[in-house]
Amino acid sequence: MTRIAAVHGTPAPYRHTQREVTDMVARTCLPPGADRRVLDRLHENARVRTRNMVLPLERYAELDGFGDANDVFIGAAVDMGAEALRGALRTAGLRPADVDLLMFTSVTGVAAPSVDARLVGRLGLRSDVKRLPVFGLGCVAGAAGVARLHDYLLGRPDDVAVLLSVELCSLTFQRHDASTANLVATALFGDGAAAVVALGQGRASGAGPEVVATRSRMYPDTEHVMGWDIRSSGFKVRLDPAVPDIVRRYLADDVSDFLAEHGLKPKDVAHWVCHPGGPKVLEAVSEVLSLPDGALDVTWRSLAEVGNLSSSSVLHVLRDTLEQRRPEPGSPGLLMAMGPGFCCELVLLRW
């Protein structure tokens, strides 16, 4: 058994309405005098009302290439990561010295030494703490990270394992790029961090959910649908409109087969902790799983309030579920996210 002892989310410091972000994107991504109706429509349809970003809006036009944006990433990721990790440990009633494994994930910047390494001395983590920096999983990394903590704790049941995610998606927005993929990304993605504290069976206690089982799935011939094309200007997003179709093709069978191994059906799941990939993806998830009205309300609310935070998003949804829904003891939940690969990660929870 692995128990999730705490989840703490940290927003980026600057909060903006969707309209303010849309106007910034029009200034920095569209040619002078260009018709902005497509941009406006994409941003209006994203179902995002507000977002937090790591810089004031006027600073984005000043970023000079990948190196400049990545320098901002490193400094802000360390600051936000420290806040998220402190908050999660405080909620769990633990000290930094109690952490045995620190897994760090991000897909919006790179650092060597990695961000987790920069936090060891700053937070007072032990010098023998095990570290695992992960890059490339993208949006799926929140769910996959929880799953990998579970894998680790099965072998070390007396340990404390922490997942830390920091995603500063706004630093990847491409200036002077009016492509549909870039405009969709600027409509959906925001900045944030989250940390999860998980306890092995030997020390698990408290009211947080247990991780019962996990499932990873890769889908054939889908490597092209999501990811980065890495350029001198930074991470240029690749988003194929076929993503909702892939969800419709595969997700229902994957979820049903996974739940059936544990004597459950989708209708038995009391709490759906789903990554807010965007309106079309969420509509596809609801459709193929025949979810009842309100099943994804926490996810839709997160999308509206902070946007898609890549790997941090599903962890924010998990935090909000714990705080707002107060699941009944013994009730099952399913945490799930999708990302580059194209892939899916499923985590069966029990409160």
Image: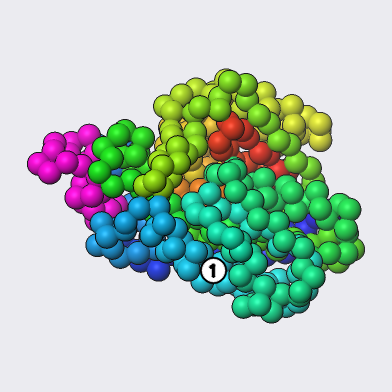
The quarter holding residue 290 reads top right
Q: Is residue 116 above or below residue 90?
A: above
Per the rendered image, the range of residues in magenta is 18-40
| Position of residue 130 measured from the top left corner of the image (x, y, whole percent) | 77, 63
Q: Residue at x 40, y 52 (%)?
A: 66
Horizontal side of residue 54 vs 290, given as left or right? left
| Position of residue 95 measured from the top left corner of the image (x, y, whole percent) | 72, 78
Q: Is residue 250 visible?
A: yes
Q: Mark 1: few, some, or many residues within 10 Å (few <14, many ≥20)?
A: some
| Position of residue 89 measured from the top left corner of the image (x, y, whole percent) | 68, 72
| Position of residue 218 measured from the top left corner of the image (x, y, whole percent) | 66, 29
Residue 18 or residue 109, whichever sits in front: 109
Q: Is residue 48 visible?
A: no
Helix, strand or loop for the magenta stretch, by majority: helix
Horizontal side of residue 36 vs 155, given as left or right? left
Q: Residue at x 67, y 45 (%)?
A: 144
Q: Which residue is mark 1?
A: 78
